Image (spheres, helix red, strand yellow):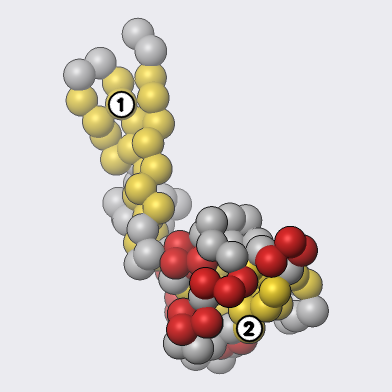
Amino acid sequence: MAKAIGIDLGTTNSVVAVWEGDKAAVIPNNEGARTTPSVVAYTEDGQRLVGKIAQRQAVMNPESTIYSAKRFVGRRWGEVDEESKIVSYKVVKGPSDAVRFDVRGKKIAPEV
């Protein structure tokens, strides 16, 4: 029987589920939780942290912790002026007026 995977990319939390037969089953993350915070952090030594661990270190690393990225997905530079003022990381203009996050000198697309 065919399976399908669904991803709910939320502004605050994300969930992944598999549809098998006639029902969906949420896939727990590696900590056993059914939801994962929609947070990604980049550390000074080059690590990329995702979920709860990224969320936990946000106070110590605010400029390199990306949250609420969904509000920037698919939008152009001229459309995000208000949103870019309420986050702790740098939102910058990318190629062809695309939105990018400037994290430790590297330009990162919201979709990444």
Q: Residue furthest left?
A: 22
Q: Residue at x 50, y 88 (%)?
A: 85
Q: Amino acid at mark 2?
A: Lys
Asked if residue 31 is positioned above or below residue 83 in the image, the reply reads above
Q: Residue at x 52, y 72 (%)?
A: 79
Q: Amino acid at mark 1?
A: Trp
Asked if residue 20 is positioned above or below residue 57 in the image, the reply reads above
- Report the side of 96 relative to 80 (left or right): right
Q: Nearer the viewer, residue 111 or 53?
A: 111
Asked if residue 16 is positioned above or below residue 108 in the image, the reply reads above
- Label 2 crowd (10 A; few <14 / some 14-19 / many >=20): some
Q: Quadrant of the C terminus?
A: bottom right
Q: Earlier in the sequence, mark 2 or mark 1?
A: 1
Number of the label disc, if any, that sits on residue 19? 1
Mark 2 vs mark 1: give the one in front: 2
Q: Position of residue 9 (x, y in %)?
A: 40, 53
Q: Quadrant of the N terminus?
A: top left
